[in-house]
Image (tube, grey):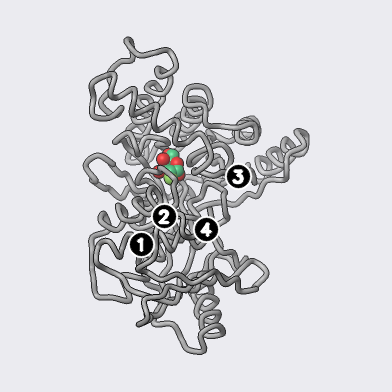
Amino acid sequence: TFAAGNGSGGMNSTGSNIAAEAFRRLHGVAPAGVWSAPGRVNLIGEHTDYNDGFVLPFAIPHRTRVAAAPREDGLITFASVEEDGQIAVAEPVRLAELAPEAVRGWAAYPAGVAWVLRQQGVGGGADLVVAGNVPRGAGLSSSHSLEVATALALLGLGDAHPSTSDIAKWVQQAENDFVGAPTGLLDQTASLCCTDAHVLFLDVRTGKQEQVPFDAASHGLEVLVIDTRVSHSLVESGYGERRKGCERAAELLGVAALRDATGDEDLPEELRPLVRHVVTENDRVLKTVELLKQERYAEIGPLLSGSHASLRDDYRVSCAELDVAADAAEKAGALGARMIGGGFGGSAIALVPEELRERVESAVAEAFAEHGFVAPRMFTAVPSEGAGRDV
Ligand code: GAF
């Protein structure tokens, strides 16, 4: 996963200035515009998206920005502002020659998006300069924020106005067919459609969306993100294998997707826990939405912890660092904690009473030190704006 870092915090204008300034330095002119897209935290509903189920993400303040201008010669150029402020320039590609595997490294993400858009007959050549601060490989959707910002930039340079659900599907296609990560629709939809102060309740099967107000602070609570610094890759991890297992289970059960499963009796032993996770996780999402609507925030804690246990024991996508993070946070007073995203590394979240945040942070840091793990990074995440044009 990739996100160019500039270490400059999450302010839109600052980040856009960095991208625009780097564009000017590199190309000698101002960009035609700057587009940006956030990373996400998924409050609950993990590994349900490709099973036609429910998810409940919110956008975080960390964003990836793309400063862009059109080119007439059919080339796409890529550059990114790195954490130390240096500009890394990737090999330019000819749109007409784009093909999966033709582009390696971080530029594969924007290149994949350009490739899909071209097949849709939208988007032409462009100069793209990326800057951002979504932590890479941290399970916070850095790659999707880059892809979504690129899609909006390339679309914005032309005059196509597709729906957000079309854009989400195109970004998914770029991930699946160009980058080679068999991901679902959670991350790009979150990045595109989340709004300030809300979680997005998405039914992936129908595409139905509901913005549910989510203001943890007014309940004296915080969502603490714990980045384990164990970098994960959805191309290489067991993600694809889990997905295949779910498809196989659905086929054997004779249902369209595990969303429809009602039992697992006749399945081979190894597929049953997958079904159990998906069915119980969908149920936890629905319960969480109900509790939030009734302003019973503290009561979602056990659902978050239940999600973690299910991902750890049934779906088996957690890792030692994620388990230690969730466990230490709970022991120090978090009301619930869980790994988020694909797993095998990345981040966990903990729902923490404000007055206990420092205690929870210290407890997690100490537990990591005791286990000899790299020190985690922690921050409180508040639901922020979805993707759009900045400048
Ligand atoms: C990753 C994927 F990109 C999502 O589509 C989703 O499956 C998630 O893992 C697990 O819920 O973030």
Specify the amino acid type for callout 1: Trp
Q: Of the residues under marks 1 and 4, which one precedes in the sequence?
A: 4
Report the front residue among 317 and 331.
Answer: 317
Q: Which residue is mark 2?
A: 100
Picture residue at 40% right of the left edge, 66% below the top: 150
Q: Which is in the foreground here, disc 3 or disc 2? A: 2
Residue drawn at 51 percent across, 70 percent down: 130
Depicted 133 relative to depicted 325: above or below? below
The residue singled out by tag 3 in the image is: 226
Q: Which mark lies nearer to you, 1 or 3? A: 1
Badge 4 element:
loop
Q: Identify the secondary structure beneath mark 2.
A: loop
In this figure, which residue is indicated by the disc labeled 4? 104
- Sequence-earlier tag: 3 or 4: 4
Residue denoted by label 1: 115
Task: Please tell me how crowded label 3 is: few (under 14), some (14-19), or many (20+) other residues with Cα within 10 Å.
Answer: many
Q: Is the C-beta separation of discs 3 and 2 under 8 Å? A: no
At 68% from the left and 39% from the top, the residue drawn is 364
The residue carrying mark 3 has its beta carbon less than 8 Å from ligand 1: no
Chain-order first, disc 3 or disc 2: 2
- Is 126 placed left or right of 254 in the picture? right
Residue closest to the eye, 249 or 227: 249
Alpha carbon distance from label 1 to label 3: 34 Å
Residue 101: image location, x then y, percent? 46, 54
